[in-house]
Structures are given as structure tokens and as C-alpha cells.
Image (cartoon, helix red, strand yellow):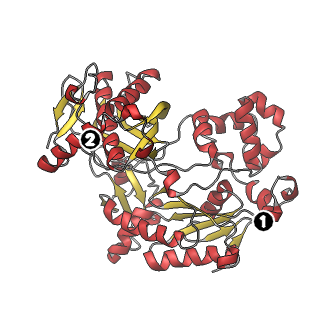
Amino acid sequence: MALARAPAGGEAGKMGYDCAMARWILHVDMDAFFASVEQLDRPELRGRPVIVGGLGRRGVVSTASYEARAFGVHSAMPTARARKLCPHGVFLAPRFARYEEVAATMRTILSAFSPVVEPLSLDEAFVDLTGTERLHGPVERTAGEIHRRIRTETGVPCSVGLAPNKLLAKLASEAAKPGGAHIVHEEDVEGFLSPLSVSRLWGVGPQTTRKLAERGVHTVGDLRRVDASLLHSWFGPAAGAQLWRLARGLDESPVHSTRDAKSISQEVTYPEDLFREEDIARELRQLAVAAASRLAEEGWLATTVRIKIRWADFTTRTRQVRLPEPTDHPVLIADEAVALLRRGEVHPEVGVRLLGVGLAGLVAATFRPAHLFVPLQLGAALQQIRSRHGAHPLSLGVPGEGHPRPEVGILDSGAKDDADAEMDERGRGRGGGGGVGERNRAMRLPNSDHGIPPRQGLVLLPTRG
């Protein structure tokens, strides 16, 4: 399998690459993953428009097959809108267990070629192939073999991009879609990047794209011609410097192994919008405690708490805070999530349709500070409750009226946040997180008998069946 090569440019020698130690990063992306798996398992669906996502009134499209995309259907679109655009499409609820099975096969293949694999989601990963030539031969051949094996052993098409860094590798795999492979050598970078829209660069969201367009900057080639001092004056020193580097394809971010890249998150899309702050706070607490429960079960402590809010108009914001100490304490995590909510902007006139809580910067629970061992008794008590009464006997909330049980299982639409937030999060070269669409796990039980101080407004609620 031959890899397509990007057109050559003329700035490789001035870009800071060390040609004596060539760095090679592979980006693998399964094409229309959920829909492709459904077409694999049900041959009668091949060639037909398949849409996977929430099927309810408030459902959102997770994945659309290329046949469905021809009718304008895309991920993050409300399912109701997709039905209007493609009324003859096949609409299916996601089967996460099956998708994980296929994704595990993909990860096994990647791990056979490099120990440094960074999964970004079920269907996407970076692989560091630097120095693997001694074992597997030229990296171009290795990329081709990975591409072939994934297609053969999973039965699902994928696209791969090979380049000197993560930024370029991801752009290369996008250029290879659907089902192809693309390589960008150091000397090809300028020619490859120049015609691309600036919106294709990491961290360049709608606001930054608009501001650049107002100044006549539309393509990466346009951006490359803007002086660094001018970018600093437009966007500030940090963002300006980052834009200057991105325009030249510069990215030193490392590929993180599975262990380093791990994070845990819980998200739900609600059947009815949430308007009252107390309702939103209650739901965030539920999500935070569910995430903390998973954290403890898997033997991790979190150093960062992140929340995600999507309003009914699909505006999306993320906020995060770094904790003073690693923890899996559900009440502490819930308090931080609610504090993040109250720290940011509020749109009382626009309801909230999706909430998420993510835990990142994970360290093994063996690094737990000594004074945090008391909450371990809480986890033991919880596990006894779960073993006797099932996985969901209790939930954590605040006093108030109950809210309709949310629709769980809708994947993150990937909607972009503000440009500055994107530059901060995505500009580091890290991919998106996983763990979306999972049902809430067992809830931690705050109890003075275990030495846990009471928290204001904290109550136990039985989960609804």
C-alpha cells in the first residue's frame, strides 16, 4: 500500500527540525466508526445511509456514514434534523460494547509496532514510530502495514497520516479520508499546510478564525506571511506565538502512552433543558460522584476537575481547576464541579441540554496523601452496598424537586469552545477525551460515621428505575 505524499515546500531547513534524529508520528482514525461497525455487522446496510446516535426527541447524531453525509447529516446534529435531511436513513442506537471490541483490536495492532500509543477516543490514536526502523524497517512501510492490518483484522476502514509531529500527522490523516494513507515529510510541510484553512489548525476555533478573516488571513499560507509581532498585537503574546508556530507546522508535544493519557468523564444529554441553577448543580453533583466512583474502582486519583456545559443553542464551554492534592473523594470532587459552574457565565434565558464532568491528571492511588486514607472506608462501604443491592442503589444530590431521568449514552459532539479556551486546551497537542456516554456508576455515601465532614445541601437520593 503506497502512501500519498504531500507537495514539497521550501522552508524545511528553517523550521527547527533535527534531520539527524527524524521524528515520526502516526495518526490513525477509523472512518465513520460507529456506522462502519454497523455496516460490517449487518451487510444489508452497506451502501445505505446509516446514522448512529440518540433516537429520542433530544437525541444527537454521534456518527453518520459517508452515504448519510452526502445528504448533509453530520455528527453533533440533532437527530430530528437528521431525520428531515435523510428520512430514508437507517437510524440506530449506539452499541458501545461492540465498538470497544473493535477498538481493542485496533489498539492491539498499534501496540505491536510501538510501545508508545496514545488513544484519543475509541476510534482514534497517535503512535510514536520514532526509532522503530531497526525493528520494522522504513516508517513508510510500517505505516502501510498498520493500515492494512487494521482494515483486514477489524473489517472497518481507517485513514492514517504519517508526519514529523502530532499536528501534521492528524492533518495528514484528514487529508487521507476516507480510507487512505498520507505522508508529510519535513521538506513537504509548507506545501502541505499553505492551502489549508486556518480553522484546520489546533486551537484555532470560530472566534480566532473570524478575527483572522477580518484581517485578510484565510489560509495557513496567509498566516505564515503575518509577522510574529503583528500576531502578538492581535492575540496577545502567548496565543500569537502559538499561531506563528502552528503556521509553520511546529509541534513538540509528545505522544503519551495509554497510562499517561488516561482520563475519566461522565456526560449526559437531558430530555428537557435545565434552567434553574439548583437543578444544574444537582445534576453536576450526580455526574461528579459517578466519575469519582469509577476513579476509585480503577485505582486512580485525580488532580484536575473539568466540567462541560452545552446550552440549547449548542454553545459549549469547558472549565477546569487543578486540585491542591490528588483525590478520589466524591464530595470534594462534586464541590469543585459546582464551584466551576458558579464561577463562569450564566445564560438563564437559554436552557442547558448537556452536562459533563471529567477527571484528568490521574495518578495511581498508591500516591494518596496520608490524611486522605479515611475516605477509603467510604469506598468499602459503597462496594458492600453495590454487592448486595446492585450497581445503582444510591445517588447524590441536593434538596429540591426531582428532574426527569436524563437520556444517557449520547457521545460528545465535539463542538468547539471559545478560541482562547481552544488554544489553551488543544494547542498543547493532546486529543480529546473518552468516557462519554457511559451510564452513571454507584454513588459514594457521605457519612459522619466514616469521618467525612458534612457538606451543605448534600442529601442522598434513591435512583429512579
Residue matched to label 2: 379
Q: Residue at x 65, y 78 (%)?
A: 136
Residue at which label 1 appears: 7
| Residue 214 in sight here | no
Counting from the top left corner in percent of width and height, residue 123 is at: 47, 61
Q: Nearer the viewer, mark 1 or mark 2?
A: 2
Quarter location, residue 67? bottom left
Task: Determine whether the residue tagged by mark 2 lies in a helix, strand or loop.
Answer: helix
Give the residue drawn at x 21%, y 41%.
382
Q: Earlier in the sequence, mark 1 or mark 2?
A: 1
Q: Give the quarter of the figure containing the N terminus.
A: bottom right
Q: Is residue 50 left or right of residue 164?
A: left
Q: Position of residue 239 (x, y in %)?
A: 70, 35
Q: Residue at x 72, y 28 (%)?
A: 236
Under mark 2, the amino acid is Gly
Residue 16, given in percent of the width and then of the height, sits at 82, 52
Q: Where 132 sits versus 425, above or below?
A: below
Q: Is residue 130 left or right of residue 80?
A: right
Give the residue displayed 75% in from the left and 30% down from the top.
237
